[in-house]
Image (cartoon, grey):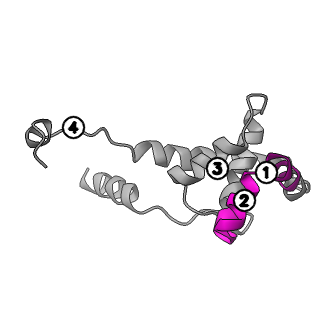
C-alpha cells in the first residue's frame, strides 16, 4: 500500500518530459492553455484540438516568442499545423490522442481546491 501511495505522490510532483515523434513538448501551463484558446474556433473538431495541442507545445519548446506570435495569426497557425501533420498516420493520430489525454489527466490531478484558513477569512495574511 505504501509503495502505491509513494508512486502516486511522486508522480503528482514530477512528470517526465513529454515528446511526440521525438519532438519535445513544453509543459502544459495556463499560458499554453491561453494560446490554445486563441487559435480555436467553435467549428473545430476534437481531432483539430489534439493536433493543435501537440503542435503548440512543440512550437513553445522550440521558440516561445515565435509560438506566441504564430498563435495570434489563426490562418497562419492552421496552415503550419496542416503542413506539420501532413505525413502522419492513423497510428500517429491514436498516439497523439492518448498523449493529450494523458497530459490533460495529469493537469486535472494536479488541481487543488483552496480552502481558506481561519486567519485569511478574517483578512489577516
- Which structural element holds mark 4? loop
Task: Tell me which numbered mark, 1 or 4, is placed earlier along the sequence.
Answer: 1
Mark 3 or mark 2, whichever is nearer to me: 2
Quadrant of the image occupied by residue 39: top right
Question: CA–CA distance between discs 1 and 4?
Answer: 40 Å
Question: CA–CA distance between discs 3 and 2?
Answer: 10 Å
Residue, disc 4? 115
Residue, disc 2? 69
Is there CB contact under 8 Å for labels 1 and 2? yes
Question: CA–CA distance between discs 4 and 2?
Answer: 37 Å
Check disc 2: other Cα within 10 Å, few if <14, some if 14-19, many if 20+.
few
Percent coordinates x, y for residue 15 in the rendering = 47, 61
Mark 4 or mark 2, whichever is nearer to me: 2
In the picture provided, is 10 more to the left or to the right than 26?
Answer: left
Percent coordinates x, y for residue 112 in the rendering = 33, 42
The residue under the point 79% across, 51% down is 73
Question: CA–CA distance between discs 3 and 1?
Answer: 11 Å
In the picture provided, is 107 more to the left or to the right than 1?
Answer: right
Question: CA–CA distance between discs 4 and 3?
Answer: 29 Å
Residue, disc 3? 35
Task: Tell me which numbered mark, 4 or 2, is placed earlier along the sequence.
Answer: 2
Q: Main secondary structure of the magenta part?
A: helix
Residue stretch in magenta: 58-81
- Which structural element holds mark 3? helix
Question: CA–CA distance between discs 1 and 2?
Answer: 7 Å
Task: Tell me which numbered mark, 4 or 3, is placed earlier along the sequence.
Answer: 3
Mark 4 or mark 3, whichever is nearer to me: 3
Magenta run includes residue 63: yes
Image: 103 above or below 26: above
Amino acid at each position: 500500500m505504501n509503495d502505491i501511495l509513494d508512486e502516486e505522490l511522486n508522480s503528482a510532483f514530477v512528470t517526465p518530459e513529454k515528446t511526440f515523434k521525438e519532438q519535445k513538448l513544453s509543459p502544459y501551463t495556463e499560458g499554453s492553455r491561453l494560446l490554445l484558446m486563441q487559435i480555436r474556433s467553435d467549428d473545430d473538431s476534437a481531432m483539430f484540438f489534439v493536433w493543435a495541442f501537440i503542435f503548440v507545445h512543440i512550437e513553445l519548446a522550440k521558440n516561445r516568442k515565435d509560438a506566441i506570435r504564430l498563435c495570434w495569426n489563426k490562418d497562419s497557425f492552421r496552415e503550419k499545423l496542416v503542413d506539420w501533420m501532413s505525413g502522419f498516420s492513423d497510428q500517429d493520430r491514436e498516439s497523439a490522442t492518448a498523449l493529450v489525454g494523458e497530459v490533460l489527466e495529469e493537469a486535472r490531478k494536479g488541481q487543488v481546491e483552496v480552502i481558506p484558513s481561519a486567519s485569511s477569512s478574517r483578512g489577516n495574511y
